[in-house]
Image (tube, rainbow, N blue to C red):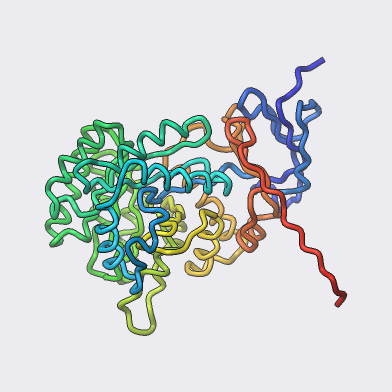
Amino acid sequence: MSELLDIVFRNVRMLEHSESRGLIDIGVKNGKIAMLGSIDEQGEREIDGVGHMLLPPFVESHIHLDTVLTAGEPALNESGTLFEGIGLWQKRKQALTYEDVTERAEKVLRMQMAAGILHVRTQADISDPKLTALRALIALRERVKPYMNLQVIAFPQDGIRACPDNERRLEQALELGADGIGAIPHLEPTREEGLASLEICFSLAEKYGCFVHVFCDEMDDAHSTFLENVAYLAIRSGLRERVTAAHANAAAYYSEAYFQKVQGLLARSGVNVVCCPLINSAMQGRYDGYPKGRGITRIKELWSAGVNVSIAHDDIQTPFYPLGTGNMLQAAHIAAHLAHMTGSKEVAELVRMITTRAANTLQLKEYGLEIGHSASFIILPGDDAMDLVREQPSCRYVVSRGRIVAETVPAWSQLFTTL
C-alpha cells in the first residue's frame, strides 16, 4: 500500500490549461509538490478545489514596509503629489522606532499572506543615520522565513549625491545583510549628479554581488531619461537580470523614436521593470493640464518587446498613497485599464506579472507549480485569468511549504426578493 500524501487538493485548474477547462489534482508531501495531474493516491487531508484556479503564490515586487499604515501621520497628503508625500515622510520618520516599523510591517505582511502573497521585496529608507527601518526589516525577514520570503533593499530616499552620507549607509546596509541597494537619480540636484549616483550604486553592487533596484524616472517629464543609463550599466556591470528599474513613468512621455531605442536597450540588458499602477495613476499627472497623462510606464509595449515587467503595490496607506489593501489582483485590474490590456491573452499576462514575472524580478528559486518544487501555492475562485482580474477574489487557500497558512471562507449573499 502506497504511503499517504499529506494533502491532496482535487479538481483545480491551472492558468495554462484554463481554456481547455481541464481539472487536475495537486498532491503535497513533506513540504514539496509530490504529484500534479490525475492523482490516484490518497491524502491524509483531501480538499475539493471545486474548479477553482491554482496559481503559484503572488509576488509583491516593490513595496515600502517601513512607511505602511502611516497615512495621516502627521497629516494626509492633500495635494496627492510625490513632493508633499516626501515632505510628510521626512516629518514622520523623525518619530521612527524599531518597534514602530516592526509592528506596522508585520501587520501588513499578515495582510499580504492572507491575500496570497508569499514573496515580498521591500524598500527600507536608509536616510536615517541609525538605519532603524533597515535593521527592523532585516530582523523581520529572518522571523518570517518559515512561511514567507522577504527581500530587503536599502533605499536612499534623500538621494546619494544630495545626501552624501547615504553612500556610506548603503555599504553599511549591505554589511548588515541587505539583499540589495537602490538609487533615486531623478531626484538628485542635477542630471549629472543623478548619473553619478547610479555609478556609485552599481559600483557597490558589483563589489557585493547584490541586487540593484532603482527608483527610475518617477516623473511626468520626457527629459528624465535615466532608464537608458540603468540598462547600460546593467550590461556593463554584468548584473543584468539582477537589476530592476521601478516606476519608469517618464517613458510614457518619450518621443516614439527615443522610446524604441530605450526599449531595445532594456530588452537586451535583461533589466526588469516594475510598474506600480495604483499609486502612480493617483500621483502622476498632478501637474498636467488636460489631457492628463495616464501615470504609468508603457507596460504593454515593454512586455511585447521581451522586457520582464511585473506589477506591484508600492504603498499601502502611506503619506504617498492613502489607499491599498494588499490584493495583487487589484493592482493588475487597474493596470488592465491604464495599459489597455483587456484581451484574453493580455489579461493572462497581467496575472503572470504578479506571479511568475514578478518571481523572475526577485530571482526566486523553486518557484512555480512543478513536481519537486516547494509546495507553495494559492487556490482562488475563478475559471480563468479574466475572472481573477475582473472579480479580484480572495484566496480560498494559501499554502506555504506544504502547510495551509490562510483560508478565506467565501461570502454568501442571500436575496429576499424575486425579480
> Which residue is found at the position 20% from the left and 37% from the top?
171
Q: Is residue 231 above or below residue 87?
A: above
Residue 321 appears in the figure: yes
Give residue 381's position: percent from left, percent from top.
70, 52
- Classify residue 37 by image quadrant: top right
Q: Nearer the viewer, residue 238 or 318?
A: 318
Give residue 207's position: percent from left, percent from top.
21, 33
* Position of residue 106 in the picture relative to residue 32 (left or right): left
Q: Nearer the viewer, residue 101 or 28?
A: 101
Q: Is residue 350 above or below residue 146?
A: below
* Position of residue 203 in the picture relative to residue 33 (left or right): left
Residue 355 appears in the figure: no
* Position of residue 56 in the picture relative to residue 162 (left or right): right
Q: Is residue 248 above or below residue 109?
A: below
> Which residue is found at the position 42% from the left and 55% from the top?
69
Give residue 9's position: percent from left, percent from top.
73, 37
